[in-house]
Image (cartoon, rainbow, N blue to C red):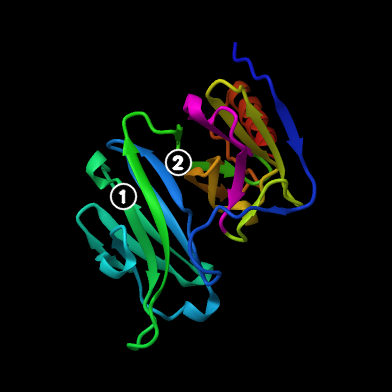
Amino acid sequence: MEQWSVWIWIKTDVKFCFFSAGSESLRTLKHLTVRRGESLTVPCLYAQKYKSHRKYWCKGEHWISCRIVAYANTSNTGISVTDHPSQNMFTVDLNNLQDSDSGWYWCAVEIGGDETPDDRGAVYLKVSSDPALWVENSTVIGQEEGGVRIQGFYSSGYKNKEKKWCRFKDWSCYPFQNSTVKISDDWIGSFRVEMIGLQKSDAGWYWFSAGDVGVTVHLTVTERPTDCTTTNTHSGAKEPIEMLQFCLHLN
């Protein structure tokens, strides 16, 4: 049986956290970790004024010498950048990451003109077989009014670091006004986040952080079935009873 030493029920006013790198017009996380051979998505938020600007992903420790890896809505080997104008966000999908992929990267928006530098935000990516922080599943699916559970782990060096669960859409960290979240930390390397009473508006990108290190998680919320109609073509009584129980369960 699992033992969880700390349980915190949170349902209160919104708090904001500043786990970001970049300007107020373009934000991303500043330190991400991932296990070797796995994939990672980096969300980059941008201001409304950049909706029609070209976005890109750049690699290099220094901005002045970084190398453009891929532009939005194009793909490179193992990398794709997708713009989501309706969300004021573009995402960078990195696949089959290896230790050599560790280093500094930049989310960037093309401004244009020699006198106006492109807007950008730096993120450091660390790939290893034993990362400081990781989650079992970076994508989770829940049903309206239902719940989801995110299970994660951290290394011993982060045992006493502050843990946060935050969402990209409004760059806010829980406690959050209109959601119920249950967070547990066993203080020896394992944490769990449970979200219940899900609404469609809860869908989107989140991150979990320990200290200044983070991992990203995407939540999809599906519609809850509201109707169930069946036609019984058999003469036996057992099947209609089972179908009725199934429909009651859905509702």
| Residue picked out by circle 2 | 138
Q: For the residue carrying disc 1, how many other residues have a C-alpha within 10 Å: few (<14), some (14-19), or many (20+)?
A: some
Q: Residue at x 32, y 34 (%)?
A: 128
Which residue is outermost to the right? 12
Task: Please determine whether, in this image, residue 81 is positioned above or below residue 143.
Answer: below
Counting residues from the N terminus, which is met first, the one under dot 2 or under dot 1?
1
- Boundaries of the magenta span: 147-168
Q: Is residue 69 visible?
A: no
Can you tell which quarter of the image residue 71 is in? Answer: bottom left
Which residue is outermost to the left? 77
- Name the image quarter holding the C terminus: top right
- Name the image quarter holding the N terminus: top right
Q: Nearer the viewer, residue 195 or 186?
A: 186
Task: Please determine whether, in this image, residue 106 is positioned above or below residue 11.
Answer: below
Q: Residue at x 30, y 63 (%)?
A: 58
Label 2: state its secondary structure.
loop
Q: Amino acid at mark 1?
A: Gly
The label nearer to you, 2 versus 1, is: 1
Task: Please determine whether, in this image, residue 14 is positioned above or below residue 56.
Answer: above
Residue 148 magenta-highlighted: yes
Q: Is residue 71 visible?
A: yes
| Residue picked out by circle 1 | 103
Spot occupied by residue 90 in the image (x, y as percentages of width and height): 43, 65
Q: Residue at x 40, y 68 (%)?
A: 83
Can you tell which quarter of the image residue 84 is in? Answer: bottom left
